[in-house]
Image (tube, helix red, strand yellow):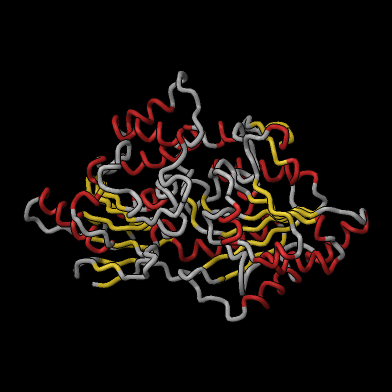
Amino acid sequence: MKVINPIDPMKKELILPDTTAVYAMKAPPALVNADKAIMDALNNPIESESLAAIAKAKLAVNKDATAVIVISDNTRPVPYKGEGNILTPIIQVLFDAGFKADRVTALVSTGTHRPMTDEELEAVIDPWVYEQGVRVVNHDCLDDDGLTYLGKTERGSEVWISSLYLQSDLKILTGLVESHFMAGVSGGRKSICPGLISEMGTFLFHGAPMMGHPDSRDLLLEGNPVHEESLAFAKMAGSDFIVNVTLDHAFKITGIYAGDMEAAHLAAFEMIRGYAKIPIESEADIVVTHAGFVGINHYQSAKAAFAAIGAMKENGYLISIANYTDKKDIVGSVNYKTVLAILANHGSKALVKLLHSPDWPFTPDQWQVQKWAAAFDKIPLDHYYHYAPQIEAGREAGLPGINAAKLTDKRDYTSVVKAAIEDIYRREGTRDLTILYLSDGPYAIPYVK
């Protein structure tokens, strides 16, 4: 059968065995007139004055007021360019209120990710923004001189936040709300934490106990310690207005949630929660998934494996395909590779035990490997098949699982997945195996109904 393969740059469909059970979210339709809907949301926000009213109030206090618009990096397909983008209307409202272009900054909430290159920024930000003279800046979590200390959270995290953000008179957050494998959903408070914090701020926030907490998971906010700690950081830093969106499979806007940081974000979460959990008939022997837009490298593709846990049988198999678009590093940071090698060589139990050891020095990016380990608590390492055309056969040293590129000379997704399924049948003998395809990859959360 032919199914959607949203990560294939050639837009080719993925062909799977006819017996495959296919599951997908039933997302709401795209907005008919996104540009009008954006302006309506800016003028009639949730539990907040309009953006124009807030902007004018800031200028009334200080005629040379500054504004910062926090934007997501290229791991999120937030519409910042072209028709139906949310960035240019926000800036235009500020201009109409009286803000000068040289007093407006778009701040990329990179968190602990590497800074975006000029080429990457120009690919996602509308050229009109640059033409107006609006400055675009990457957050740097390692720049101590560019961070301001605000104190500690109740849990004890050191709260260092971007000084550029804190010193701005008008603080606006933007982002995408979708399922998130540790924070419940993305968007809202995550623009600040981890988006604008120091690397030190992740030590407790993304430490082993919090990552291993059963409520640090997708589509859950109440009692989720990662969400609660993120929100604590964000409330200490403050914000004046947020503009968050939800998107469909084609990255078209399905909803706009503007206004108060908590109230608008919660409204988006309630909408997402209604369709992002997908009931399945039963766990499958073989689960096929993909890393989605967010899977720009191996680090980010952990989200697809974690999301698939509810669909896999104990000791079953997972096949995950990806398209690694990160031109700097298709695997991840040196820290990530180091911890990942421990998982690949010693297994999930040994890794998690090590991360919880008092002698283990916290290592940035260890949290992503810990989430990989959760998948390998359910299936053995060698029951995971992965494929991204950017990782050639023979270059998989240090990566857990089997590089399915070794199984065939062909390099299209259908041929590689077919080869992986055939290899699984060779290992399992003649018994019938159930196959399930998660067409939404990391964005939908399967559960046995």
Q: Nearer the viewer, residue 448 or 42?
A: 42
Percent across and percent down for residue 301 are: 40, 50
Viewer-closest of 373 and 90? 90
Figure check: 75 above or below 139: below
Q: Residue furthest bottom?
A: 32
Residue 231 visible in image: no
> In which quadrant of the rendered image does the N terminus lie?
bottom left
Q: Residue at x 75, y 40 (%)?
A: 163
Residue at 84% x, 60% y is 100
* Residue that appears at 63% across and 36% down: 198
Can residue 407 be seen from the camera position used here? yes
Residue 48 location, x and y as percent?
A: 76, 62
416 or 127, nearer to the observer:
127
Q: Position of residue 27 (x, y in %)?
A: 47, 70
Q: Quadrant of residue 243?
A: bottom right
Give the left or right position of residue 32, taking residue 378 as reference: right
